[in-house]
Amino acid sequence: MILITLSLMLSNSVYAKICMDDPRMFTIKTILEQATDGTSYKPMKLTPTTFLMLTPPTRKALGDNIVVYNDECIPQQIFKGQLPRKIEMPYEDLSYALHMSLIQNDAKTANVIFNSFVSAPKTASEIVPMIYALEWHNKAIENLYSQGMLEKRGMSYLGTNANKKRLCESTLSHLTHLELFTALGGKTTEQDITTVELESTHISLQARNSSVYTERFQTMDKSEEVTCNPYNVNRILSSIKTANIDLQEVRLLQYSPGFFKDYDKMKKAKQAASSSGI
């Protein structure tokens, strides 16, 4: 049921509404036979979603005889399996297509997603809540790592206990949507800031209209129970900065409701100084 719902969401995406797939997709068997026989035919014009959902045999048969609509509904010719310019797509569509390709061991499509597409921007308040684990098939996660798209990292422990730190860092961290979003080129719609409070086993972040408090992960070291942050904090913070969001570290009870107003005033002052050449 979940997969059916997601498929419907993809088929009704903004690209499907603006651009239409080549009507020959309804008789694709004829086109594939022509491609196999070497018969000449006009390139297939496809929306980005349909292009990414092609099965490996279909993609192989069509080769580069495909034109893909970009985010402005302008067709782009495929060359050596890649697009000449990256196409912007919603993160939800890209991550779904990537998940499906990795489950099917379709490395070619996965590489196309990373090389020819980019995640559409989100606000900082939309990005911060993306710090939660990918609920992907284990096979897809392993393929994501084995194909070099992301590097394996250990969990974090920001306390001073060396033994707990060693145990946490030797345990594979959970991968988050935030990390994948920025790996796919995702950034904020405009530069913004978020506060971050770092504790030994968790972090909490506060954006303008959202916040997140990471859960804890319990593991055992012989008879001792150890609590880790299930994510790699360094990569989380690096991903936030990559998304063009400034970080302001705070301590407990330091956060003030006027924090973002002060940041906006400072930002406007810098822009005014820059435009006047000061």
Image (spheres, grey):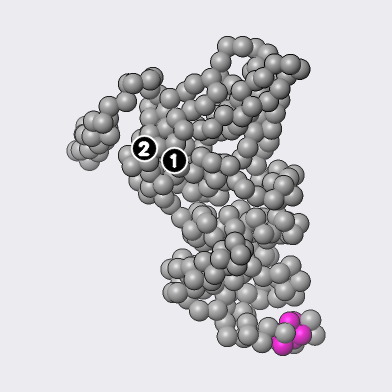
Numbered badge on residue 128: 1
Q: Nearer the viewer, residue 74 or 247?
A: 247
Viewer can see residue 152: yes
Q: Residue at x 59, y 58 (%)?
A: 96
Q: Quadrant of residue 99?
A: bottom right
Above or below, 66 relative to 99? below
**Residue, disc 2:** 207
Q: Give amino acid for label 1.
A: Val
Q: Is disc 2 placed on a helix, strand or loop?
A: loop
Q: Is residue 127 left or right of residue 28?
A: left
Q: What's the magenta region? A: 30-35
Q: Residue 213: horizontal and vertical position, in percent?
A: 46, 33
Principal secondary structure, stretch drawn in magenta: helix
Quarter-wise, where is residue 219 in the image? top right
Closer-to-camera residue (7/49): 7
The stretch drawn in magenta includes residue 120: no
Rounded to the nearest angstrom, the CA distance separating label 1 from label 2 is: 7 Å
Q: Residue at x 57, y 82 (%)?
A: 22
Res 153 visible: no
**Residue 253 location in percent, x, y?**
33, 21
Query: In which quadrant is the C terminus drawn?
Result: top left
In this rendering, the answer to whether 262 lies above or below 144 is: above
Residue 129: x and y in percent read 45, 42
Q: Nearer the viewer, residue 168 or 39?
A: 168
Asked whether 34 falls inside the magenta stretch, the response is: yes
- Give the crowd class for mark 2: few <14, some 14-19, many >=20 residues within 10 Å: many
